[in-house]
Amino acid sequence: MKPQYQEPEPQYQPAPKPQPSPKPQPQYQPSPKPQPQYQPAPKPQPAPKPQPQYQPAPKPQPQYQPAPQYAPAEYEPAQYQYEYAVRDEYSGSEYSAQETRDGSNVQGGYSVLLPDGRTQRVTFSVEGDSGFVADVQYEGTARPYVAPEPKYEPQQPSYEPAPAPQQPSYEPAPAPQQPSYQ
């Protein structure tokens, strides 16, 4: 036996209507948002400007002090003695000096050979406030100055003749080498 196939009867069924799915509801509770707390900005208050207080500058009062009193310095009376002498035959110089002091009393002297050949000797003394007292004496006789006679001697020129100029010497250049082909 062979099975037989029976075709089913077509049946029409309308399409199901779409059913919207319900919106899910959140399961959490959001934390409350902080509410802003506004404080009004401070209003600017005008600051009073201080008015300058002008006062005249105080007049300086001079402070006078008496001038310092200075007494002259006290020194011990000076006491010294010195002497020196020079005789130079090469230059013809000859002179000497000596002096002694004891407090305000000074005695001394000096001598010098003058150009005219005489020797001048000076002795001096100072006693307290009497001032400088000098005694000047000359020894020897003055010789008159005689100027030397000028002598004219013509000078002979002493020179050597200039060297003769050198003449250049030329040598011929070497001949260039030619290659030899063999």
Image (cartoon, rainbow, N blue to C red):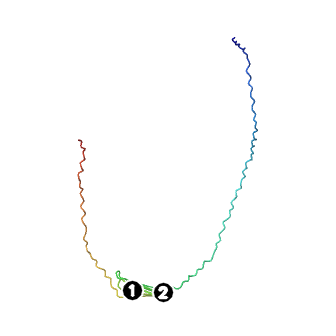
Q: x, y (%) of residue 37? A: 75, 45
Assess disc 2: are there few (<14), some (14-19) or many (≥20) residues with their C-alpha within 10 Å of its C-alpha: some
The image quarter containing residue 5 is: top right
Q: x, y (%) of residue 91? A: 35, 80
Left or right: residue 115 compared with residue 20: left
Q: Nearer the viewer, residue 129 or 52?
A: 129
Read off the residue under disc 2. Answer: 101
The image quarter containing residue 34 is: top right
Note whether 181 is above or below 124 in the view shown.
above
- Quadrant housing the C terminus: top left
Note whether 104 is above or below 37 in the view shown.
below
- Quadrant housing the N terminus: top right
Note whether 174 is above or below 55 in the view shown.
above
Q: Secondary structure at mark 1?
A: strand
Read off the residue under disc 1. Answer: 120
Note whether 140 is above or below 18 in the view shown.
below
Q: Residue at x 37, y 86 (%)?
A: 119
Left or right: residue 41 compared with residue 134: right
Q: Which mark is residue 175?
A: none
Numbered marks: total: 2
Residue type indicated by callout 1: Gln
Q: Secondary structure at mark 2?
A: strand
Q: Nearer the viewer, residue 97 or 59?
A: 97
Q: x, y (%) of residue 60? A: 65, 69
The image quarter containing residue 179 is: top left
Return the disc, 1 or 2, that comes first in the chain's sequence.
2
Q: x, y (%) of residue 26? A: 75, 35
Left or right: residue 27 compared with residue 114: right
Residue type indicated by callout 2: Arg
Q: Residue at x 39, y 86 (%)?
A: 120
Residue at the outermost front position: 1
Q: Residues under labels 1 and 2: Cα distance?
A: 23 Å
